[in-house]
Image: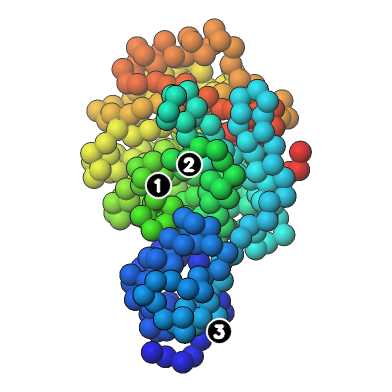
């Protein structure tokens, strides 16, 4: 056993069990004890490493307590929609800039009531999608893995029903904070960590091609969603400036590689903008882009507080769905974006107090 403690505290919630073991092993901590410590912090909410544990030396635990810290986000505000029960949390972490998390209620099945947590991975975003409030903020900073993990832990501890899923669809582009996001997803899915099914964790990207390929090569078990929004290159570039860096042919090649490697249907997200991307030309182009590859298309109405972009009417939306049914021949699902009245809907998060 070494006598020297690390210079900086080792943060729980910032490491997978394997990563934490690598940091604590020099103190004489076993892999089994690491898993027990992780469970104490992440599942039972300990605010510091336990002082006593069965079959464990108090002296060793004291060394662990001296070497570690359990960081915690500060809750600045919580707002629940009286309309649909979505809850938005405003947190502050290691930096001065607040960021947001949304609790999505899935309470329609008696006896199986649960929540999904929509987490942020960055404060702000550098990609500047024109209909997104986060994109208008610009990029502030990446969140640490523990700041992502603690969003879920705090929502879980505040909830009357269990948290069964996590979606990386809050503030920021997850694949521009890849390493920390993947660490957080692994911590949240470990049996000694968040104990959330890895397949119930969804990573959404607007199309960072090198990271999609890395995600594929690493055979990550989490679900992947590609935010497409237009199949017309010029239109997509106007709406999602990332198109200029990773154009549609390159993006769809990476998506096909993912499908071939993982053998599963690819989910594409489409933000509906009235009069912009709901015409039959988009349905035809999308069918050409995805020919021979099974996909699922999630349609989401835009939420733009500036009023520059509006959601389609029921008739316009249905006409587009009919065109997709004819051209695409694949599942098309309308995804509900709740919490609009508390600015918690998709594309509305901007780190503001209510």
Residue 44 or 322: which is nearer the viewer?
44
Task: Give yes or no for contact between labels 1 and 2 (Cβ–Cβ under 8 Å).
Answer: yes
Q: Is residue 139 left or right of residue 11?
A: right
Residues at marks 1 and 2, CA–CA distance in whole angstroms: 8 Å
Identify the residue shown where x is 27% and y is 39%. 259
Above or below 7: residue 14: above
- In the image, farthest residue toward the bottom: 3
Relative to 287, residue 105 above or below: below
* Circle number at residue 7: 3
Q: Secondary structure at mark 2?
A: strand
Q: Residue at x 43, y 52 (%)?
A: 194
Q: CA distance from mark 3 to mark 1?
A: 33 Å
Which of disc 1 and disc 3 is earlier in sequence? 3
Residue that label 2 marks: 163
Number of the front mark, 3 or 2? 2
Q: Residue furthest top?
A: 315
Q: Quadrant of residue 341?
A: top right
């Amino acid at each position: 056993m070494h006598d020297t403690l690390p210079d900086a505290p080792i943060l729980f919630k910032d490491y997978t069990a394997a990563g934490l073991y690598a940091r604590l092993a020099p103190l004489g901590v076993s892999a089994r004890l690491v898993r027990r410590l992780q469970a104490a912090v992440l599942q039972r909410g300990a605010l510091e490493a336990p002082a006593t544990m069965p079959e464990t030396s108090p002296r060793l635990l004291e060394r662990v307590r001296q070497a570690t810290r359990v960081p915690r986000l500060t809750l600045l505000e919580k707002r629940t929609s009286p309309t649909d029960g979505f809850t938005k949390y405003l947190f502050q972490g290691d930096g001065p800039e607040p960021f947001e998390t949304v609790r999505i209620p899935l309470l329609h099945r008696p006896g199986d009531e649960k929540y999904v947590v929509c987490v942020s991975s960055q404060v702000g975003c550098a990609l500047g999608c024109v209909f997104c409030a986060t994109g208008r903020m610009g990029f502030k900073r990446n969140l640490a893995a523990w700041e992502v993990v603690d969003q879920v832990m705090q929502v879980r501890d505040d909830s009357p029903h269990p948290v069964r899923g996590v979606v990386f669809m809050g503030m920021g582009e997850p694949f521009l904070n890849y390493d920390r996001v993947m660490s957080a997803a692994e911590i949240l899915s470990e049996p000694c960590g968040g104990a959330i099914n890895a397949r119930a964790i969804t990573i959404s990207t607007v199309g960072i091609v090198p990271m999609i390929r890395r995600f594929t090569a690493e055979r990550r078990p989490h679900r992947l969603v590609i935010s497409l929004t237009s199949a017309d290159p010029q239109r997509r570039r106007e709406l999602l400036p990332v198109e200029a860096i990773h154009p549609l042919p390159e993006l769809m090649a990476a998506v096909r590689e993912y499908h071939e490697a993982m053998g599963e249907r690819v989910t594409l997200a489409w933000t509906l903008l009235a009069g912009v991307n709901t015409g039959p030309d988009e349905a035809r182009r999308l069918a050409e882009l995805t020919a021979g590859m099974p996909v699922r298309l999630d349609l989401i109405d835009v939420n733009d507080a500036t009023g520059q972009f509006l959601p389609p009417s029921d008739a316009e939306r249905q006409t587009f769905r009919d065109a997709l049914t004819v051209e695409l021949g694949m599942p098309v699902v309308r995804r509900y974006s709740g919490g609009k009245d508390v600015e918690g809907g998709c594309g509305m998060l901007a780190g503001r107090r209510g």
